[in-house]
Amino acid sequence: MKTINIVRVPACRHQFASWGLEDVFYNSKLIYSIKNLSFTGQFKTEIIIESLQRSLRVCNLLGIDSRHHFKKIYLYNPQIGALEIDWMMSKTGFNLMVMQLPSLNEQMAQWLWELASE
């Protein structure tokens, strides 16, 4: 008589596979970057970083996983021969960051209206 060996697959193996799928889903939502704010030309890097930090703090205070809305990426700039840091963001994360910016002018108001009506 032939015997059959049953192999047990641990549950954690499947759990890691689902984490990969979840990461892919949330990464697909990261369609904005800090570079999208460059059209205004009025914000210094320090102001943008401060706005980003406040947005990350909002997520932290509400218990929201900020990795679903913000992801640090590194871009190579061949003009200066160095890596630069940028952040990819979901629409929710980007809107939250824009709300944290300190000033508003007519150009920014128009852009915010277009962003809100998408």
Image (tube, rainbow, N blue to C red):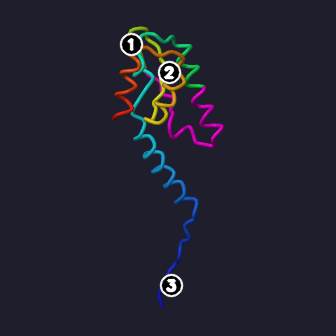
Residue located beneath label 3 in the image? 3
Q: Helix or strand or loop: what does disc 1 sit on? A: loop
x, y percent for residue 107: 37, 15
Please say if 48 is above or below 18: above
Q: Which label's residue is closer to the chain start, 2 or 1?
A: 1
Q: Amino acid at mark 2?
A: Ile
Q: Amino acid at mark 3?
A: Thr
Q: Residues within 10 Å of mark 2 (few under 14, many from 20)?
A: few
Residue closer to the observer: 102 or 50: 102
Q: Residue furthest bottom?
A: 1
Q: Helix or strand or loop: what does disc 2 sit on? A: strand
Please say if 33 is above or below 20: above
Instruction: Please tell me whether mark 2 or mark 1 is closer to you in this view.
Output: 2
3D distance between C-alphas at marks 2 and 1: 14 Å
Mark 2–mark 3 contact, CB under 8 Å?
no
Please say if 84 is above or below 60: above
Residue located beneath label 2 in the image? 85
Q: Amino acid at mark 1?
A: Pro
- The magenta region covers 54-75
Instruction: Please tell me whether mark 2 or mark 3 is closer to you in this view.
Output: 2
Instruction: Please tell me whether mark 1 or mark 3 is closer to you in this view.
Output: 1
Q: Residues within 10 Å of mark 1 (few under 14, many from 20)?
A: few
Q: Left of 18 or right of it: where is 39?
A: left
Q: Residue drawn 60% across and 25% down?
A: 53
Name the mark on residue 78: 1
Residue closer to the observer: 4 or 12: 12
Quarter of the rendering containing residue 90: top left
